[in-house]
Amino acid sequence: MRVKQFRFQQRAVSEIFNNFEIGKKDIVLEAPTGSGKTVMLLQFMEKVAEIDSRDIAFVWLTPGAGELEEQQWAKASNSSRYLIPQRLDDIWEGGFSRSTVTFINWEAVTNKKTIARRGGDVASIESIVKREKLDGRKFVLVIDEEHRNQTVKAQDVVDMFDAISIIRASATPVEDDSLTAVKVTEGEAIFEHLITRRVVLNEGLSVDNEAADYLYFLDKANAKRLQIQSEYRKIGKNINPLVLIQFPDEKTGKSDLAAASRQERTRLIDEVVDALKNEFNQNDDEIGIWLSDEKINIDSIAKNDNQVNFLLIKQAVSTGWDAPRAKILVKLRLNMDANFTLQTIGRIRRMPEQIHYDNEILDDAYVYSNDINYVNEVLKGHAADKIALYHLNPDVDSDVFKLKSIKKRNTYSADVPTVEKRYVEQLQKELGVIPGQFNKNKELLAKNNYIFGIDVFSKIPEGRISRLEEIVDLPKTDNRVPVVDTRQFGLRVEAVLQAVAAYFHVKQNTRVVRSIMMDLFRAGDQGGVIKQIVSLSAKEWYAFIVNNGPKLRDVAKRMDIRLSGIIGSEQLSFDTISKEVELTDFTLKNPDSYAVHTGVKYDVLPKNVYEGYTTANWVKQSDPERRIERQLEMIPEVKWVYRSKDHGHEFFSITYDANQREFYPDYLVIDRKNNLYIIETKGAKNENIDEYAAGKFKALQQYVVSDVTASSVRFAFVRFDKSAGILKYNNTKWSDNLEVISEWKPLIDLFKN
């Protein structure tokens, strides 16, 4: 079964693979819970098994008490094409053979009393690993939730394998500058609808309420559960939201403190179960228990329509457990135990259908807790937010901005056949080739120094590259290597495909590029919509791609440059509205919610369209955003300011990148003359990390002059110039360089025209 990959996952897999292939020993994947760490790690190993010619076996080490490695093994078994998934028991007969991935629980190999480590007459894992290494096998370790096993015993196991590379994965990895980090941000996972947009903490509670007893918090959680359930039914979804009630792991030991803690924990669990039955009318089959010594009603609990409404869990289940219907977490105070973990919050952030519903009730997750220390840690770590409602100023109408959003239709997807067609057009333009005329095309390509045959003419100097795609530009040598086994050249082909991918705008999805290159240059029916340029055997195709990598990449680059203007003008071509995008009226919500810091000093920002909005609402705002909100308050010409949201069908957005992406400008501003300004903020010099900034700039520039907007609508990109100490705007021509005074001007001048 082919697993869907999202763009950020493709990018992360490519980064891990590239770092692995250039010899990085320790790589860490830092990705939020729900972003698909398992998928990314499996895809990395698939790529190595498919492309790397070395004799490599993978070992996947998991934490927990034995459930997680079974989950991972099942996922691998359902999706693997090149990997051979196996359990620990399989190694006693078959060992660690090439392309196997063996899923092992830490406890099975860190305890020397287990059969895996016992030795003697029984084969031990050490003896099998030693035998495999003598046979020339190389190991790659994958350490899942790596922060959980930072022990001497665990390190002994790692050392035993003497792995050529170790891939560590966690949402909260241990900080170590010696590791090569590959990071997936929370924003990327939210953008792809994989996790909730926000986590809301103690919604609607005052400070006085937060010390209430457990019944009060269970009541709040149950009311929210019923509200979510109702919203699902309104849109025809048979999803039963699940409430997690978390308790600390049971303390071990014979001390009086440990005994008292166990007694208090047992009392609270019994009281909660009794309350669920008698106060909230839950039947036995609607209450699940997943504790160390008790497991009830947990079969199929992850299914969206499962009947269990409340699940009592231990803290340790915060790792590696999946139930995307879980939407609410209740963390109750225990007087005898101050230990807790924030990681369980990740368990309520998965979206059950991997889509956002443009409904805040369904697109958020919720935490209720009477544990003040826990609440403070959650807020300090930005794991969740306090939310407050604000009403529009009486002088502001909900349609004050009179704008239309350009929304991407959910059915739209990248048009790969169009990319292939445009690439052929570029080859025709440069070389005169005609699809289907194989012999003539081969002569034209050869005349332009394209190399044919089954010999590869280049060699890879070791230690000379920092990125895999740099292989494409390595100098040619007189060395001729015939293509006998195509797998030996898989890595070289992959480098070319990565180099081309950037200009095909498919991010790191080299499978798409491979498909196009096979359509155009391989013999046989490859399934493409255009006839081949030349018809090459498998060995000839591998040699052709490797030898002509720079040329194939440069054709794609010139195609991209030539089409940039065409693609840009297509973004606002409204004759395609019904197919790709739709226009929707934008109006301000009344009321609307913003996250808020509690117990901090703040300044009221009276020009904001919402009454009561203050600097305390700057919870996750960037430095440029904070600066511009301050300055807009001080500019006399400015009348109203609206801080927009970065998601949701009801908020203002436009499309860019040939209608493939949406973005939500940061601010809408109205001046005293009722001119409207759409403003996007970016980082300071060397801090503009948005790779799509130029595309967004062009899209806004076109939007304000289109027939969708009134003549009084303007736009600006705003950045902070550290050297000048001021905010600057640009609304003429995009430039990364803030010192180009013809493009970047003081923000205060924007409102004087």
Image: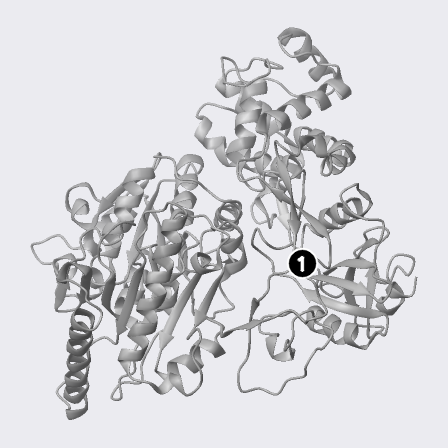
Q: Quadrant of the C terminus?
A: bottom right
The quadrant holding residue 429 is top right
Q: Is mark 1 on a helix, strand or loop?
A: loop
Residue shown at 59% from the left, 25% from the top = 417
Q: Residue 748: x and y, percent?
A: 86, 69
Foreground: 477 or 403? 403
The residue type indicated by label 1 comes to: Ile
Within-10-Å neighbours for mark 1: few <14, some 14–19, many 20+:
few
Q: Against 299, is 391 above or below?
A: below
Q: Is residue 153 visible to us here?
A: no
Answer left or right for 524 relative to 546.
left
The quadrant holding residue 210 is bottom left
Answer left or right for 196 relative to 245.
right
Q: Against 423, is 651 above or below?
A: below
Q: How is the image coloured?
A: one colour
Q: Is residue 729 visible to us here?
A: yes
Q: In which quarter of the image is the N terminus?
A: top left
Residue marked by disc 1: 689
Answer left or right for 79 relative to 722.
left
Residue shown at 50% from the left, 33% from the top = 511
Foreground: 621 or 101? 621
Foreground: 650 or 193? 650
Q: Residue 143: x and y, percent?
A: 35, 58
- Picture mark count: 1
Q: Residue 555: x and y, percent?
A: 71, 29
